[in-house]
Image (cartoon, rainbow, N blue to C red):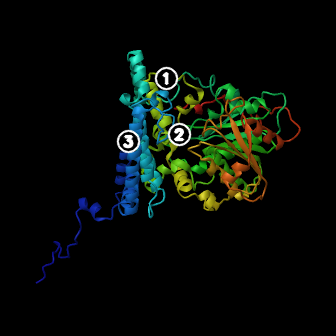
Amino acid sequence: MSNSLKRRDGGPLERRAAPLLTPLLRPQSFETVDRVAQATAARFTHGISPHAQLSAWIDWAAHLAQSPGRQMELAAEAYAATARLAHFGLHNLVSDRAERPFAPEPGDHRFDDPAWGAFPWLFIEQAFLAQRQWWRKATRETRGMRPNTAARVSFLALKYLDAFSPSNLFWFNPVVLDRTQREGGANLVRGLEYFIDDLLDAATQSNGNGNGFVLGKDVAATPGEVIYRNHLMELIQYSPATETVYAEPLLIVPAWIMKYYVLDLAAHHSLARYLVERGFTVFMISWRNPDARDRDTALDDYRTQGVMAALDVINAVVPGRKVHATGYCLGGTLLSIAAATMARDGDDRLASITLLASQTDFSEPGDLMLFVDWAQVAFLEDMMWDQGYLDTHQMAGVFMALRSNELFWARAVKEYLLGERDPPTDLMAWSEDQTRMPYRMHAEYLRGLFLENRLTAGRFAVENEVITLKDIAAPMFVVGTETDHISPWRSVYKAHLFTDTDMTFVLTNGGHNAGVVSEPGHPGRRYHIGVRARREPYVGADHWRERARLIEGSWWPAWAAWLEQRSATERTPPPPMGSQQKGHVPLEPAPGRYVRQR
């Protein structure tokens, strides 16, 4: 007798799962849950991946644990450093001329004040520098480590140690103690007021405009008109300042990681004004500050709706003329991509290309690479996926970490302990006026350029076809800055490797921003300059520096002269503001609408 179940009509009973259980019996993906968890964690860490840091420490510790030779070396170093420190301390008790066994690194000014030269402060300083030197040696690369692990661990270890530098601690800083004694603690009261002000600004996420500088009046004040606007950018045409102008217009493509007016600060060091006053017809892109609605904006949208759209408008205003194109920082990388694409497609509208502190190769991108690996990018992507963008404060934290001693600790000691606050500058006002980065664009940038270095590896495709920088025929003027932590000059110099056109390279002193904003008359400015002719053999960066001509002063006049040499000899009357025939009429006075977005 069969034990199978029957329906009432005698037919076999079908076995069906209960409707509530059906979804659980199907293959499921819980990736969204993972991304939400990662995004939640990222909000607390400001986008810094704990895994990326922890894995570096584990890799370092594991290789050190199986390296007895390195362990013995470090033990011997610790013993020798302790002995030198003890010897110095004993001699310092009886003589103030004892030679210091440990010296700060070049550029470290924490112990410059003469007060650090007296006992016991000198001994405290030397003890700290001894620890720092030992940790630098302890975090050197060990055979078998993953690439970049040693650099990342060294960076993290020294940053943690710097947080406890005696210069940052009230009881161990003789300058602070002396100031407190002389002022009866008034410096600490002022410092507390400054601290509360900054705390309130951070709590309310105040972003710029609290420093007294007014857009359109104090900064971004070069006269002009917004003649074009799309969803991604506004195009500013600056008003002529001379009776005649060079026939070829000039387009500036700034980075969208910050506002454009780093190139149009106060009148005395505005690059835009400088060019206009020398007879150039200057156009400037002002990028929109994206929000969550722009999450799917791609990197190529910045090319098509930014650079290419601007060129089309400029050709309408100044028809029949090629354009001098200039890109700054990330804007220069974008301009390089656009120029290579144009060259591939037979578009020869560029008269010249200028790259200011811009990288085209990312194999050695500098200290930023300490924050970028596959784990970190995935963590950051999940946070941006949740928000729709990379927030201004999350991005600013990374740049501050790169130079924490100068940008955070030195400023904290000066303001909160010494009670001194420097008056704001236009460059400081600009640096606080931050922008956001769209999710998709920033993810494509980090993966395609930073991690995979596709642009110079022959794997960067635009409109489904690979581009190469070697197709660019327009002459190039490339500027690197000596102390750039964002675009190291040797990385910028690699443009020589991947192009065949005539190139003038300038290496100026200063950092990523201050080296570019280097107006004539700025004290202490100097630069090296050299020319590479088309198809000339490659010369290494350091060898080039030895051979290049050193010139005192600003590099701006040299660039202006270079542009003049590549412009038509006969100057023309200034073009109209916009193009009535093409529908590009002035929309509003510069600096426009997008630069004011928060």
- Mark 3 and mark 2 lie on one chain; the one further toward the N terminus is 3
For the residues labelled 1 and 2, the Cα–Cα distance comes to: 33 Å
Along the viewing direction, whichever of 181 and 490 lies nearer the viewer: 181
Label 3: which residue? 86
Indicate whether 548 appears above or below 596: below
Judged by depth in the image, the label closer to the viewer, 3 or 2, is: 3
Q: Look at label 3 and name its amino acid.
A: Ala
Dot 1 lies on which element? loop
x, y percentage for residue 20? 24, 59
Numbered circle sitting on residue 421: 1
For the residues labelled 3 and 1, the Cα–Cα distance comes to: 38 Å
**Residue at image x 68%, y 59%?**
468
Q: Look at label 1 and name its amino acid.
A: Arg
User: Taking 546 as reference, is 13 left or right?
Assistant: left
Farthest residue toward the front?
A: 94
For the residues labelled 3 and 2, the Cα–Cα distance comes to: 58 Å
User: Taking 131 as reference, is 598 left or right?
Assistant: right
Residue 46 visible? The answer is: no
- Mark 3 and mark 1 lie on one chain; the one further toward the N terminus is 3
Residue 81 visible? The answer is: yes
User: In the rendered image, which quarter is residue 199 located in?
Assistant: top left
User: In the rendered image, which quarter is residue 262 located in?
Assistant: top right
Along the viewing direction, whichever of 576 and 213 lies nearer the viewer: 213
Q: Look at label 2 and name its amino acid.
A: Pro
Numbered circle sitting on residue 340: none
Farthest residue toward the left?
A: 1
**Residue at image x 20%, y 76%?**
11
Along the viewing direction, whichever of 436 and 218 lies nearer the viewer: 218
